[in-house]
Image (cartoon, rainbow, N blue to C red):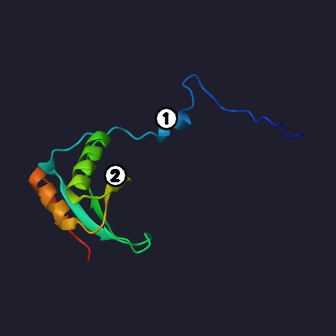
Amino acid sequence: MAKDKRPTVWSSGHGDLRQKSKKSASVISLPPEQQKVYLHRESKGRGGKTVSLVKNLVLSEKDMKGLAKILKRACGTGGTIKNNIIEIQGEHRDKIASVLRKLGYKVVISGG
């Protein structure tokens, strides 16, 4: 049997379900008083450059972006959000901890 150059594509009345499964469910932000945030320092796989990681946040995407912006501005540096972890360029755990404490978060600094 010869192979068809245009293979059959599965579809349903609901559209392509594969695309819908990739979207994550919306997360409801917890108040800062109910969250315990962990600050880590990491340089692995970054060419020796250090980043400060803010982990264990339960925030919506919008709130996560807003908090990342506040932290980047306080540290005077760049950063990003990957897999619900805020990455701030450089060693700024002390500055980040003070900002988060002012906002009401419980902060644990870990790592060397």
Which residue, as the protein is rendered here, is positioned at the far right? Answer: 1
45 left or right of 79 in image? right
Residue at image point 89% right, 40% down: 2
x, y (%) of residue 91?
26, 69
Residue at image point 14% right, 56% down: 99
Residue at image point 26% right, 54% down: 72
- Mark before the other along the chain sequence, 2 or 1: 1
* Quarter of the view holding residue 105: bottom left
Residue marked by disc 1: 20
x, y (%) of residue 110?
23, 71
Q: Is residue 49 above or below residue 38?
A: below
Secondary structure of the residue carrying tag 1 is: helix
Residue at mark 2 to residue at mark 1: CA–CA distance? 20 Å
Secondary structure of the residue carrying tag 2 is: loop
Which image quadrant: the C terminus? bottom left
Amino acid at dot 1: Lys
Residue closer to the observer: 37 or 63: 63
Q: Is residue 19 above or below residue 81?
A: above
Amino acid at dot 2: Asn
Q: Is residue 54 above or below residue 21?
A: below
Residue at image point 23% right, 53% down: 73
Which residue, as the protein is rendered here, is positioned at the far bottom? Answer: 112
x, y (%) of residue 64?
28, 46
Near mark 2 (Cα within 10 A), the count class, few <14, some 14-19 or many ≥20, is some
Near mark 1 (Cα within 10 A), the count class, few <14, some 14-19 or many ≥20, is few
Which of the labelled discs sits on residue 84, or is there none?
Answer: 2
Q: Is residue 104 visible?
A: no
